[in-house]
Image (tube, grey):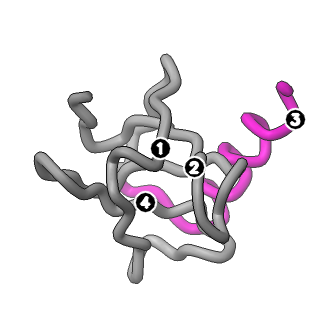
Amino acid sequence: MKLLKGSVVRAEAGRDGGGYFAVVDADERYCFIADGKSRKLAKPKRKNIKHVSLTNSMVDLKDITDKKLRTLMKQFGEDE
């Protein structure tokens, strides 16, 4: 699975399971995710890519604040 910066993912395992997050950074094994609320952009969570599922959405992380990111991620949770 190829994760790009700005991809929206759903956490499938762990304490964050079921939540939607934006990928801040990624490599071949881990991704760093943030949602603006429990996981801020300044200190994202490192998560194994096996424990996230990719959605078909992207967000622009350029000049974004935690509040804007929180609002965007809340919309994904309401769509279920």
Asked if the residue at tag 3 contacts the one at tag 4, i.e. Cβ–Cβ closer than 8 Å, the answer is no
Measured as percent of width and height from the top left, residue 42 is found at 39, 80
Identify the residue position indicated by label 1 in the image: 52
Identify the residue position indicated by label 4 in the image: 33
Q: Tag 3: Cα neighbours inside 10 Å, few (<14), some, or many (≥20)?
A: few
Residue under the point 40% across and 82% down:
43
What secondary structure characterizes most of the magenta part? helix
Asked if the residue at tag 4 contacts the one at tag 2, i.e. Cβ–Cβ closer than 8 Å, the answer is yes
* Residue 77 appears in view: yes
Q: Earlier in the sequence, mark 2 or mark 4?
A: 2
The three-letter code of the residue at mark 1 reads: Val
Q: Which of 11 and 70 is in front in this view?
A: 11
Measured as percent of width and height from the top left, residue 56 is found at 49, 17
Identify the residue position indicated by label 3 in the image: 78
Q: Label 1 vs label 2: CA separation?
A: 4 Å
Q: Label 2 vs label 3: CA separation?
A: 15 Å
Q: Which mark is residue 63?
A: none
Q: Which of marks 1 and 2 is nearer the N terminus?
A: 2
Q: Label 3 vs label 1: CA separation?
A: 19 Å
Residue lying furthest top in this view?
56
Decide: is 27 above or below 42.
above
Q: What stretch is highlighted in magenta?
A: 63-80
Residue under the point 29% across and 56% down:
31
Asked if the residue at tag 2 contacts the one at tag 1, i.e. Cβ–Cβ closer than 8 Å, the answer is yes
Q: Earlier in the sequence, mark 3 or mark 1?
A: 1
